[in-house]
Image: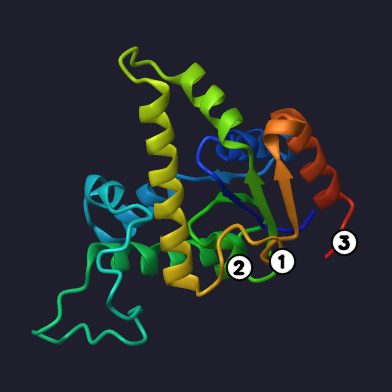
Amino acid sequence: MSKIISISREFGSGGREIGFRLAQKLGIPFYDKELITLASEDSNISAEVFHANDEVIANKERPLRTYETIDPFSPTYEIPVSDQLFVIQTKIIKQLAQNGPCVIIGRCSDVIIEDSFKVFICASLKKRLERLMALEEDPSVDVKQMETHIRTIDKKRKEYYQFYTGNEWGKPKNYDICLNSGNLGIEECVEIIANLVTKGDSLL
C-alpha cells in the first residue's frame, strides 16, 4: 500500500475516529491536530494561535495569498495567521507524503496531495446528533445547541476548503469514495477503506 489516505468529513460523522482506526489497522502514521504542532515547531508561532485559526478564513472577501504571491518584505501587508497556517501545513503535508503512506484528516490534503486516496465521510444529521450527544460531557448542552454547532462547523469546513482549493467540499466526484458512517458504522468504514487501499490502484 503506497497511498496517502486523505479523509474529509462532516462534523460528527466519526471521520477522525475512522482515520485513527484505519491508521492503526494499516500500521501507518496518523495526522490531524498533530499537523498544528508540526506547523508551530516549523514556524515558531504558538500552537495556541494556530489552534485558534485551524480551518478558519481570516477574510473571505480577499483573494487567496500564498508564499508565491506574498512579499515577505512588504511593510504594508501583514499575513493573516490563517494564511500562514495553511501555507506551512501545505509544506508539512507534502513532506509527510514523501516519507510514505499515512492518514491525514482534512486540511485540504486531498487537493495538496493529488494522487492521495480521497475519502469523504458523511452521515445524516440525526445520526451525527446521536453520536455527538452520546459523547458530550456537558449536561447543559441540548440537542438544539448541538445541531447549531454541527451546522456551524460544517459551514466553516466547507468555506475553508472551497476558499483554499476552489473545489466543492463534499461533492462525490472530488473523492475516490464517499461513505455514510451512520448507515455503515465506524468499523465497516475502516474495513472498506483498508480493503480498497491494500488491493492497489485498480479503482482509481
Amino acid type, callout 2: Ile
Q: Which residue is situated farthest in the front direction here?
A: 144
Asked where in the image residue 177 lies, by quadrant, the reply is bottom right
The residue carrying mark 2 is 113
Direction from residue 8 to residue 36 in the image, left or right: left
Q: Nearer the viewer, residue 25 or 155?
A: 155
Q: Residues within 10 Å of mark 2 (few under 14, many from 20)?
A: some
Q: Quadrant of the C terminus?
A: bottom right
Element on which disc 3 rests: loop
Q: Which residue is situated farthest in the top direction here?
A: 139
Mark 3–mark 2 distance (CA, rounded to whole Å): 18 Å
The residue carrying mark 1 is 173
Q: In the rendered view, tell whether residue 152 sits above or below residue 140.
A: below
| Mark whose residue sits in front, 3 or 2 | 3
In the rendered image, residue 90, in percent from the top left (x then y), is placed at 45, 67
Element on which disc 2 rests: loop
Mark 1–mark 3 distance (CA, rounded to whole Å): 14 Å
Q: Residues within 10 Å of mark 1 (few under 14, many from 20)?
A: few
Residue 203: assigned label: 3
Direction from residue 145 to residue 80 in the image, left or right: left
Instruction: Give the residue displayed 28% in from the left and 78% down from the top.
Output: 62
Contact between marks 1 and 2 (CB within 8 A): the answer is no
Instruction: Give the residue displayed 42% in from the left and 62% down from the top.
Output: 159
Asked where in the image residue 145 lies, by quadrant, the reply is top left
